[in-house]
Amino acid sequence: MPPGPEFPLHVFYDGSCIVCATGMAAYMKKNHEGRLVFLDVSAPDFLPEEYGISLADFMYQMHAIDRQGTVYRGPEAFWAIWQAFPSSSWYGFLGALVTLPGLNVLARLAYRGFARIRKYLPKRKNACDTGICKIGKDR
């Protein structure tokens, strides 16, 4: 893991996914002192080309990009988000766990499993009117 993200950290998540949106809402409510900027990749006005990452990749797994352009994906994106809460011993503990070599492999495998089943989870009401939720279903 790098020493830590350079804030602000842009957090890209699938707002059409109930689980994803609920998780991000919890982070949004916490006092992150402007260190986190949340972007819903399922929003019709989201332009992935601005970030050099395909929409299918954004839809497949969560991404976070810091001020220096460092890209964090999957469990590493969560680790980067947790760095925005330095006074939280809980997030510090989780961040330390996810960086341990053996546990990092397990976290990656668990996240990959979640990413594969996520497309079958319920969507937020009216979230898929544009059809964007279908992106990434072939993975």
Image: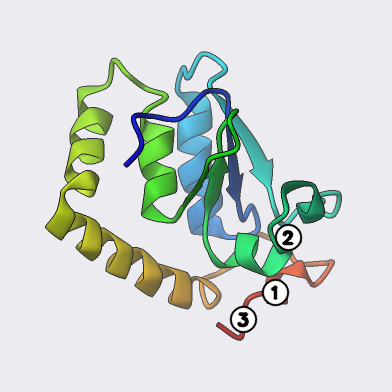
Residue 121 lies, in percent from the top left, at 51, 71
- The image quarter containing residue 81 is top left
Amino acid residing under circle 1: Ile
Mark 1, other Cα within 10 Å: few <14 / some 14–19 / many ≥20: some
Asked if residue 30 is positioned above or below residue 19 in the image, the reply reads above
Q: Tag 2 or tag 3, which sits nearer the N-term?
A: 2
Amino acid residing under circle 3: Lys
CA gap, disc 3 to disc 1?
A: 6 Å
Q: Classify mark 1: helix, strand or loop.
A: loop
Left/right placement of residue 49 relative to residue 99 reads right
**What is the quadrant of the C terminus in the image?**
bottom right
Q: Mark 2 points at which residue?
A: 127
Q: Which of marks 2 and 1 is in front?
A: 1
Residue 33 lies, in percent from the top left, at 51, 13
Residues under numbered marks 2 and 1 in contact, where contact means CB atoms less than 8 Å apart: no
**Mark number displayed over residue 137:** 3
Asked if residue 131 is positioned above or below residue 58 in the image, the reply reads below
Q: Mark 1 points at which residue?
A: 135
Residues under numbered marks 3 and 1 in contact, where contact means CB atoms less than 8 Å apart: yes
Asked if residue 24 is positioned above or below residue 106 in the image, the reply reads above
Residue beneath the point at 38% across and 48% down: 76
Residue beneath the point at 63% across and 76% down: 136
Left/right placement of residue 3 relative to residue 32 reads left
Residue 17 lies, in percent from the top left, at 58, 60
